[in-house]
Image: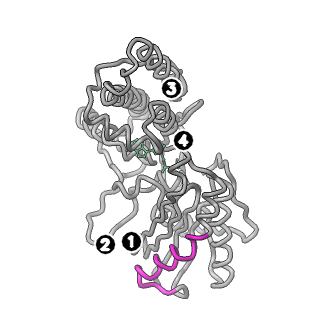
């Protein structure tokens, strides 16, 4: 009998549900919350309320699109953490209620594990292109920046991670500072395409090993813009594109420097990226060009699987389900989750 998994994702500001049959995606519905736009960031209380409104229609739509009845489901995979607690509570409580009423098991998933396994979402009529184990994943999102050695679907070693801000946070905070709005990544990415990446230079951190730091570059950009504005009040407006291009290039240089080192040290040449920042066009191009130069096999998740989505949660949940994992009904969501 086929395994039909319902995935539920509600860790931040996207309510998403997906249906997977034996690893093949049948539907993936995402309701992105617009209420946060005016606030320059996600407002946790508003996010939970929007999830509460969205969860029933989103799950119903995912089942309808997949042509699957609730009674056909084998198990429910849901994001337990990390994320905003109020948001996670909505998805977790919904998963519990459905599991209880249908008398089927539920399987918890670490949200980051979803990003790491995003390349394993199989789609009808699309060729399979999956990395072999072990592979390295550059996991870059609004809350995390890690280099992960993925030994098998469920076994990971974190080789390096940020000691302060995540790279997505650097994009978002600097965008706010430059008056470009939220979320910062997509705006900076768009403007960077129009600018000169070698025009300005920002200090890069000197952190030992494979760890990252992204808090210093924010300050570096802030002081630079402040000093230039003192000389010419129109500096920002005149140089927006070059600033974005140079800033983005610096972030990509930092990310790639450690990834190249990790690949050398581990001798692993299967390389993937995951998380919201993996949508960045500059980073995607650089991974591919470095890969060509260094003999890596690179795997980029499709854009729709880079930001938060339930398809990746369903895939991770399916791996866990097949490994015999079951999550008891008294599970509670957690805002931080160190273990995969
Ligand atoms: O993975 P994600 O959707 O949420 C979590 O943090 O879990 O990542 C969101 C982050 C935000 O910081 C956003 O600015 C960034 O991903 N992002 C991008 C791009 N699209 C989204 N950063 C750089 N370039 C992009 N095109």
Tell me if label 1 and label 2 are in contact, CB under 8 Å: yes
The kind of secondary structure the magenta stretch mainly shows is helix
Sequence-first tag of 1 and 3: 1
State the residue at coordinates (30%, 62%): 128
Report x, y in % for residue 177.
Answer: 49, 31
Neighbour tally class for label 3: few under 14, some 14-19, many 20 plus, Cα within 10 Å = many
**Among all residues in the image, which is located at the extreme right?**
330
Is residue 165 among the parts visible in the rendering? Answer: yes
Residue 24's tag is 1
Q: CA distance from mark 1 to mark 4?
A: 28 Å
Residue range of the region highlighted in magenta in the rendering: 53-69
C-alpha distance separating marks 1 and 2: 7 Å
Question: Does the closest atom of ligand 1 sit within 8 Å of the Cβ of label 4?
Answer: yes
Q: Which residue is mark 2?
A: 124
| Residue 289 horizontal/vertical position (percent) | 25, 36
Please state the horizontal and vertical placement of residue 126, each as a whole percent of the image. Answer: 27, 66
Instruction: Indicate which disc, 1 or 4, sits on the residue closer to the N terminus.
Output: 1
Residue located beneath label 4 in the image? 144
Left or right: where 337 falls relative to 77:
right
Sooner in the amino-acid sequence: mark 3 or mark 4: 4
């Amino acid at each position: 009998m086929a395994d039909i998994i319902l995935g539920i994702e509600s860790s931040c500001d996207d309510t998403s549900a997906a249906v997977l049959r034996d690893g093949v995606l049948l539907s993936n519905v995402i309701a992105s919350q617009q209420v946060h736009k005016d606030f320059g960031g996600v407002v946790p209380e508003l996010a939970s309320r929007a999830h509460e409104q969205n969860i029933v229609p989103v799950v119903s739509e995912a089942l309808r699109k997949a042509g699957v009845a609730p009674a056909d489901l084998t198990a429910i995979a849901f994001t337990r953490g990390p994320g905003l607690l109020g948001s996670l509570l909505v998805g977790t409580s919904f998963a519990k209620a459905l599991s209880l009423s249908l008398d089927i098991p539920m399987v918890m998933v670490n949200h980051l594990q979803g990003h790491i396994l995003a390349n394993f979402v199989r789609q009808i009529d699309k060729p399979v292109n999956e990395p072999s184990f072990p592979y390295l994943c550059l996991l870059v999102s609004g809350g995390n920046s890690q280099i992960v050695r993925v030994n098998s679907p469920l076994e990971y070693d974190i080789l390096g991670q940020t000691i302060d801000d995540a790279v997505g946070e650097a994009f978002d905070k600097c965008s706010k500072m430059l008056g470009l709005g939220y979320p910062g990544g997509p705006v900076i990415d768009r403007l960077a395409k129009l600018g000169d990446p070698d025009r300005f230079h920002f200090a890069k951190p000197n952190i030992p090993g494979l760890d990252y730091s992204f808090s210093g570059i924010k300050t570096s950009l802030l002081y630079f813009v402040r000093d230039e504005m003192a000389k010419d009040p129109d500096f920002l407006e005149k140089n927006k594109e070059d600033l974005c291009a140079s800033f983005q290039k610096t972030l990509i240089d930092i990310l790639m420097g450690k990834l190249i080192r990790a690949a050398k040290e581990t001798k692993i040449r299967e390389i993937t990226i995951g998380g919201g920042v993996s949508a960045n066009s500059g980073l995607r191009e650089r991974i591919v060009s470095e890969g060509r130069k260094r003999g890596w096999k690179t795997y980029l998740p499709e854009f729709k699987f880079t930001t938060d989505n339930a398809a990746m949660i369903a895939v991770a949940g399916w791996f866990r389900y097949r490994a015999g994992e079951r999550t008891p009904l008294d599970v509670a969501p957690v805002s931080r989750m160190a273990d995969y």
